[in-house]
Image: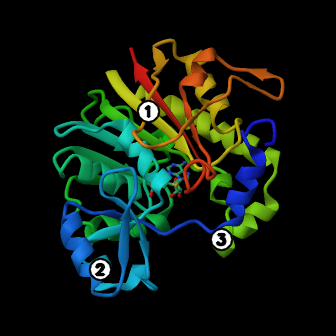
């Protein structure tokens, strides 16, 4: 990716550092002030990140095993993984679909951003991951979700009575090759994935991502917003997927976005002999040497 990623040497250096510890305060259950106070009893320090309710934390050796964790006062989530729900801009009263939801980091964040006052379909295909999703939503006090288990690309477009099922907002945080998670200290499954990773794997993954993005877009109301995100760098899984949507759905328009305090790099409109629409420059790429977190790609699409 030397041709793709700016300041490539700094990028490689950033990968050699472990991912910092980040958490999101769950305002459905507590406040920033209360959590700070409670975690300080363990000697834990919270340092604010550039997003509301987001912190890096220090001196907490078992962050997934404290009383406050089990009470759902916070969620362990990397900063860049908190950005797609922010770009989605969910509002209270809306009907929202999270097409690939487990373990529920973004579903619960959407519930938090809408104070449990939207209706969120949280969809997850994998049975095992479905129980993790249920556990996390319950732990975090999320009471505004309907859990479903469809293949995202075949998510029903009609209600049982035959009326169309359409959403105000759709999040497609797609299954991907996960290159953005390659940093020093990885889980065993991530390490294995990295060792076996190939360009072909991205191309194979893109076949499903294209089916999913079409379905996600078709499930939108007119005027609705779809956010497509991955934690990978490959343009096959990112710009090429969004370009495929633009070519197949003329009503789709890429909207530019920015997030205060977050350095985004614009998407590419050319990769290995493939030319994409210029609109792809409106997508955002996150690199660990600019935002010290996972690598991510985010696109915000409006249905006209
Ligand atoms: C990137 S993860 C989602 C992470 C989640 N959005 C979060 O923030 O916690 C992608 C998820 O999609 C699920 N998945 C894979 N193929 C799917 C399909 N065809 N339909 C629905 N979900 C699928 C995977 O099991 C995985 O849980």
Q: Residues within 10 Å of mark 3 (few under 14, many from 20)?
A: some
Q: Residue at x 54, y 46 (%)?
A: 174
Q: CA distance from mark 1 to mark 3?
A: 29 Å
**How is the structure coloured here?**
rainbow
Taking the image as shown, residue 148 lies to the left or right of residue 187, namely: left
User: Residue 6, position in %: x, y?
Assistant: 72, 39
Q: CA distance from mark 2 to mark 1?
A: 32 Å
Q: Residue at x 27, y 86 (%)?
A: 41
The reply to whether residue 147 is in sight is no
Which residue is the site of mark 3? 186
Mark 1 near mark 3, Cβ–Cβ under 8 Å?
no
User: Residue 183, position in %: x, y?
Assistant: 67, 63
Q: Residues within 10 Å of mark 1 (few under 14, many from 20)?
A: few
Which residue is the site of mark 2? 39
User: Which corner quadrant holds the N terminus?
Assistant: top right
Residue sitting nearer the eye, 239 or 288: 288
Q: Quadrant of residue 34?
A: bottom left
Residue at disc 1, secondary structure = loop
Q: CA distance from mark 2 to mark 3?
A: 26 Å
User: Residue 280, position in %: x, y?
Assistant: 60, 23
Residue sitting nearer the eye, 116 or 295: 295
Which residue is the site of mark 1? 258
Of the two numbered discs 2 and 1 on the same chain, state the one appearing first in sequence: 2
């Amino acid at each position: 990716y030397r041709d793709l990623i700016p300041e490539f040497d700094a990028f490689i250096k950033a990968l050699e550092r472990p991912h910092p510890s980040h958490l999101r305060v769950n305002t459905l259950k507590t406040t920033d002030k209360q959590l700070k106070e409670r975690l300080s009893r363990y000697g834990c320090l919270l340092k604010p990140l550039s997003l509301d309710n987001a912190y890096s934390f220090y001196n907490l050796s078992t962050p997934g095993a404290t009383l406050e964790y089990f009470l759902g006062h916070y969620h362990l989530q990397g900063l860049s993984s908190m950005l797609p729900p922010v770009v989605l801009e969910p509002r209270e009263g809306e009907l929202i679909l999270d097409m690939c939801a487990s373990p529920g980091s973004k579903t619960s964040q959407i519930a938090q951003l809408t104070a449990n006052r939207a209706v969120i379909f949280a969809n997850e295909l994998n049975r095992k991951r479905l129980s993790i999703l249920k556990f996390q939503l319950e732990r975090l006090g999320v009471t505004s979700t309907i859990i479903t288990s469809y293949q995202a690309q075949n998510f029903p477009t009609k209600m049982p009575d035959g009326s169309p099922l359409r959403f105000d907002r759709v999040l497609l945080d797609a299954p991907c090759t996960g290159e953005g998670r390659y940093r020093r200290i990885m889980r065993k499954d991530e390490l294995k994935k990295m060792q076996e990773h190939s360009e072909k794997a991205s191309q194979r993954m893109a076949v499903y991502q294209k089916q999913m993005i079409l379905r996600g877009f078709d499930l939108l109301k007119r005027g609705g917003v779809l956010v497509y995100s991955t934690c990978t760098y490959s343009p096959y899984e990112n710009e090429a997927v969004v370009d495929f949507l633009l070519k197949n759905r003329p009503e789709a328009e890429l909207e530019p976005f920015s997030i205060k305090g977050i350095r985004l790099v614009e998407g590419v409109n050319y990769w290995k002999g493939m030319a994409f629409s210029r609109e792809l420059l409106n997508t955002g790429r996150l690199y660990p040497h600019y935002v010290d977190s996972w690598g991510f790609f985010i696109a915000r699409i409006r249905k006209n």
